């Protein structure tokens, strides 16, 4: 079982979303915290970075939550911290979001991972 921590920034983003998105988010939180192996359609490593993405597919949109783990492999991780989120419109969105995730990780790293 994984410990999943949610940053204030990520919480604020989810709270602004529709009830349907919030329910899907809660479901995915349960999946990543309780299942050792998670489907690639939900969780995937972001290429050329140390971060992973959690995908919320609802309302004809894909919302991406960038997160960090305490291990090199997601399946072996014990702690996950959800850092920031955005609506995916193109692959260009990742560059800005990864920079923001790096700042947030350094903010939360000492207390969490």
Image (cartoon, helix red, strand yellow):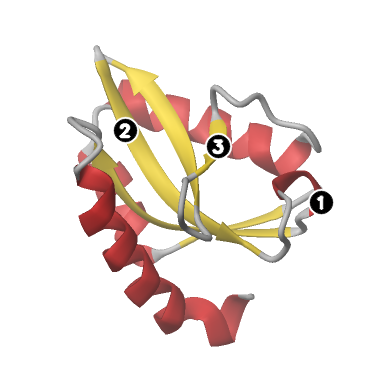
On screen, residue 13 versus residue 50, left or right, reads left
Which residue is identified by label 2?
Answer: 63
Residue shown at 47% from the left, 58% from the top: 49
Element carrying mark 3: strand
Q: Earlier in the sequence, mark 1 or mark 2?
A: 2
Which residue is identified by label 3?
Answer: 44
Q: Earlier in the sequence, mark 2 or mark 3?
A: 3
Element carrying mark 1: helix
Structural crowding at the residue carrying mark 1, measured as other residues with C-alpha within 10 Å and reported as few (<14), some (14–19) or many (≥20): few
- Camera-near label (1 vs 2) is 1
Horizontal and vertical percent for residue 87? 23, 35
Residue shown at 57% from the left, 84% from the top: 111
- Camera-near label (2 vs 3) is 3
Structural crowding at the residue carrying mark 3, measured as other residues with C-alpha within 10 Å and reported as few (<14), some (14–19) or many (≥20): some
Which residue is identified by label 1?
Answer: 76
Q: CA distance from mark 1 to mark 2?
A: 25 Å
Q: CA distance from mark 2 to mark 3?
A: 13 Å
């Amino acid at each position: 079982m994984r410990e999943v921590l949610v940053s204030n920034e990520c919480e604020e983003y989810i709270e602004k979303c529709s009830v349907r998105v919030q329910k899907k988010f809660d479901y995915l939180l349960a999946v990543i915290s309780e299942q050792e192996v998670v489907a690639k359609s939900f969780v995937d490593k972001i290429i050329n970075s140390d971060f992973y993405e959690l995908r919320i597919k609802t309302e004809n949109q894909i919302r991406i939550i960038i997160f960090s783990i305490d291990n090199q492999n997601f399946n072996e991780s014990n702690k996950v911290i959800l850092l920031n989120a955005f609506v995916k419109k193109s692959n260009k969105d990742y560059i800005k979001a990864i920079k923001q995730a790096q700042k947030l990780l350094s903010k939360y790293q000492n207390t969490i991972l």
